[in-house]
Amino acid sequence: METRYIFITGGVASSLGKGIISASLGKLLQARGYRITIQKFDPYINIDPGTLNPYEHGECYVTADGMETDLDLGHYERFTGIETTRDNSVTTGRIYLSVIEHERRGDYLGKTIQVVPHITDEIKRRILLNASKQPLDFVITEIGGTIGDIESQPFLEAIRQLRWELGSQRALNIHLTYVPYLAAADELKTKPTQTSVKQLQGLGIQPEVLILRTEHYLSDGLRNKVAHFCNVVPEAVIQSQDLPSIYEVPVDMHAHQLDEVVLRKMGIADPPEPDLKSWLDFLDSRKRAQRVLQIGLVGKYDLQDAYKSIRESLAHAGTYNGYKVQIHFINSEFITPENVAEQLAGMVGIVICPGFGQRGIEGKILAAEYARTHDLPTFGICLGFQIMVIEFARNVLGYRDANSTEMDPQTPYNVIDMMAEQKHITLKGGTMRLGAYDCVLSAGSRAARAYHDQTRIRERHRHRYEFNNSYRDEFARYGMLCAGVNPSSDLVEIMEIPSLRWYIGTQFHPEYSSTVLHPHPLFMDFVATCIKSLPTI
Ligand code: GLN
């Protein structure tokens, strides 16, 4: 089958869940046996979100091939289990950068470089790129931002052209909007949707499917009204009501026939039925898991999206262990020696989060000390791993000034130090150690057991600093052992204290590869241990 292209735009407001809708449609097409990929095109000018503060756009996700991307790629992978690559995440900055590089090389042979056609051509090339590298039946392209944003215009022009060039069987526009409920009038309002569709039409784009996000049920009459005003057939006006979990969205969209409408509109007769069995089993386990597990997330970004993949990984592991994980964000900036016990009270385990810079560091160290000395199951990720190391050096090895050279370049005990390969790097963007690298696990370690005694694993990274190997023996003598190293660089990937219930830190980010159908083994083992350490009543 020739590759088909689905474009998903959003209108009226941001944060409507375009990423979840894209991931859900991808899931449904995949469940019908189609080969798919989902990609995100973001109109902002940063080359990638790697340099963005998490308060701007939430977590920075990392692909196995080492691209720092928007967190929506995490949803795509968690829903479909298909690994994304650097080709699945494109920003205005990347588009302009490659056009300008071509111009500097003289590739345009003296032409004036313009938004149309040079920028739009580059956007189109990137939209088509994934399918030129692998056989794909569907490429779903989510356009970030909201209709009306100045910077989305070239992207909308590119998809307008592609829809025209490819024709209605091979390209389809889906527009996601919001239908607000006005309590005072007790009415649902469709005018913002009509206005948003008019704006798209003004740009030459006629959405063929509308998905209306709503907090209340939309009657047939109301959907018919939208259909009538927006030139869309009534069955292609689909409501997407708020649901208790994002993982219910694929099933809900299927119930509202989103996938069926899409296939029909693209001229696919008699498509295979979707096989959603394992997905439905997961949802079923999720509903049945009523017992609650309180896990503390010790971090500094007080924002749901900042640790998105960690939250989802804990939720997956909870479901498969028959528990609902209730996550308590504990802001490390406010942890003091006096209140640390109180701050961690009631938690059966803690995750010490990744991060950068000085803010909140000492609070994380206090949390690690408390957890280690009270045998509270603890999972340190990236900076969290480094914190466990620093705390151990200070309080067990007795190096009071031990630190990471990221926080204290003058520390006499640089137990965490900048990687040699990083020392000459001056540019901040895209220059960390990024993406998947091998790690050899120490036989018999707690970590190896968690990975079902595998000897070699592959996990994703995003860091500049590492464990200082000259301290490795000393740590081991005092009970903190290296349980995994990179086979070619000898870089320490995992440290653990085997005498404790679960005290493991990883330099890599396991949270990027936990999916709904394949929860991550370390999260599974951590959650299982937390459950075992629940007080028995
Ligand atoms: N700031 C630390 C480093 O660069 C940890 C990074 C992280 O937690 N992702 O090594």
Image: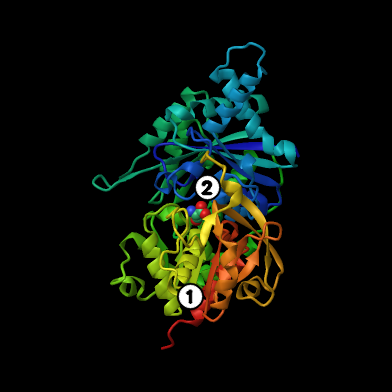
Give the x, y percent position of residue 21.
Answer: 52, 47
Find disc 2 in the rendering and name its residue.
72
Q: Earlier in the sequence, mark 2 or mark 1?
A: 2
Q: In this orientation, which residue lies closer to the viewer: 294 or 398?
A: 398
> Looking at the image, which residue is at 35% across and 75% down?
345
Give the x, y percent position of residue 311.
Answer: 48, 61
> Looking at the image, which residue is at 31% across and 74% down?
342
Left or right, residue 39 beside residue 268 = left
Quadrant in which the N terminus is drawn: top right
**Kind of residue at badge 1:** Pro
Q: Measure how far apart labels 2 and 1 are at the Cα level.
A: 30 Å
Q: In this orientation, which residue lies closer to the viewer: 79 or 414?
A: 414
> Looking at the image, which residue is at 48% across and 73% down?
397
Q: In this orientation, which residue lies closer to the viewer: 263 or 319?
A: 319
Give the x, y percent position of residue 3.
Answer: 71, 37
Q: Is residue 84 above or below residue 483?
A: above
The answer to which image quadrant residue 505 occupies is bottom right
- The chosen color scheme is rainbow
The answer to which image quadrant residue 369 occupies is bottom left
Find disc 1 in the rendering and name its residue.
377
> Looking at the image, which residue is at 63% across and 34% down?
127
Q: For the residue labelled by badge 2, is the local secondary structure a helix, a strand or a loop?
A: helix
**Furthest-front residue in view?**
412
